[in-house]
Structure formats: structure tokens, C-alpha cells
Amino acid sequence: QDEGYLWPAARPDLSPGAEATSEVVAAYGHRADIPNTRWSDLMATARRQIDLLGYAFLFLPEQFVDLALSIEHKCASGCKVRIALADPDGTQTQERDALEQLDGTLPARIRTTLGHLRDVLTIPGVELRFHNVHLYNAIYRFDDEMIVTPYLYRAHGFQHPAFRLRRLGPYGVFASFADQFETIWATATAARNPIVVSQPSGGVDGASGLLPRPQRPAR
């Protein structure tokens, strides 16, 4: 371990309560500015826990083609994965849809995310819950690193600024967002069946409400 980790008083600039803290590793004007390789690195290096909180975060499963295989390997080694999506039928989802002027498409985006996660949600060690709270930011945690995207008024997900955080200790910026995840997770509802979700009349496939299984690209 480095000096700042072992003796925080020797490096006040590393303190989570300092005016300048190394807990903030990077800042981006928009979530879309985060390199794809950064997301890949965070996913690849996570060993203990992966926590995801947002409304739909459709970009994540679409970005990782082999997400199910990667998660399966991690969970086989003891990693726990918690996914907190907005309830597609929840009142807060409807309000967020109206706020971002999405014309009623947010519930469909959440269901599309569920479709992409179909294989992931059957893996032991992965848990899905639906929240129905008004979020002020999204949280993507990978062990002791995290990306947080504070929400701007009427901005869409890719337009929000983003901060990459690193945990330095039990108090500070990282811990505050980690505590927020735990609070929301505790109030979220476990999905009764992560594969079948309620649909408007006709459902995604026109009848059952069963989400279609995304096709894997040929190797």
C-alpha cells in the first residue's frame, strides 16, 4: 500500500474530506465521453461486487457483447452482482419519462435492457430489483471503483456529466454514493420473474409479454 493509504495524515490531499481528494479519479463532461475501454477495464477487474443503479442504462448491456459469459465467470468465483432498474410500470418512471420528454419510450427502454440481460439474470449470484424512487444520479460500482452520473434537468443519460471515484476509506464521496445504493436497494422490490415482465396490451412479442432473447453475433 502507498503512503497516503497507510498514513492519511501524511497525505492530506488524499483525504476523502479534503478540498482536493484523490477519490475523484476523473471527471467527464458527459457520460458518453467515458472511453469504452474504461467501462471494459472496470468490468474486467471487478472481483467482489458489481452494483448497478439507474433507470434503464441500456448502453451497458449493448456495449458488452459477452456480458453474460463475463458475469458468469465472475459469479463462479464469488462475485455478487446487484442490478437496480426502474420499475417500467412505476410512477417515477412515468414522471422521469415526462421530464426528459421521451414521449413514453422510457418503459420500453427498461424492458429492452431486461431483454439484453435475459441470460445474465439466470446466473446464481445475480439479483435484480425494481425501484420506484426519483433518482438524482446513476451509480455503477465495481469493487472499490465507481462511476456516478449526476442528473441534469431534462438531459438524457448520455448527456449527464460523470465522475469516476475510487474508495479511500469508510467516509467520503465514494462511501456516500455507496450508502445511497444500499438505501435504495433496501426499498426496491425483487422481480417476481426477471424474464417475464408486464407489458402494455400486446406485449413486446405481441402476446405473452415475454421479452425476446437477443441474438448473439456469429463468432
Image (cartoon, rainbow, N blue to C red):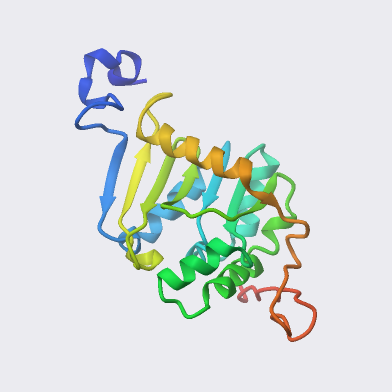
Q: Position of residue 131 (x, y in %)?
A: 60, 53
Q: Position of residue 56 (x, y in %)?
A: 53, 64
Residue appearing at x 72%, y 55% in the figure: 191
Describe residue 210's horizontal placement relative to residue 48 as left or right. right
Within the image, what quadrant is residue 87 found in? bottom right
Q: Position of residue 45 (x, y in %)?
A: 49, 43
Residue appearing at x 48%, y 71% in the figure: 97
Question: Farthest residue toward the right?
Answer: 208
Q: Nearer the viewer, residue 43 or 49?
A: 49
Q: Establish if 122 lies above or below 157.
A: above
Q: Establish if 123 lies above or below 98.
A: above
Quarter of the picture containing the C terminus is: bottom right
Q: Is residue 62 visible?
A: no
Q: Establish if 95 lies above or below 207.
A: above
Q: Is residue 34 visible?
A: yes
Within the image, what quadrant is residue 146 found in? top left
Describe residue 212's horizontal placement relative to residue 178 as left or right. right
Residue appearing at x 37%, y 66% in the figure: 158
Q: Position of residue 89 (x, y in %)?
A: 64, 67
Image mark count: 0
Describe residue 72's horizontal placement relative to residue 16 as left or right. right
Quarter of the picture containing the N terminus is: top left
Residue appearing at x 73%, y 85% in the figure: 202
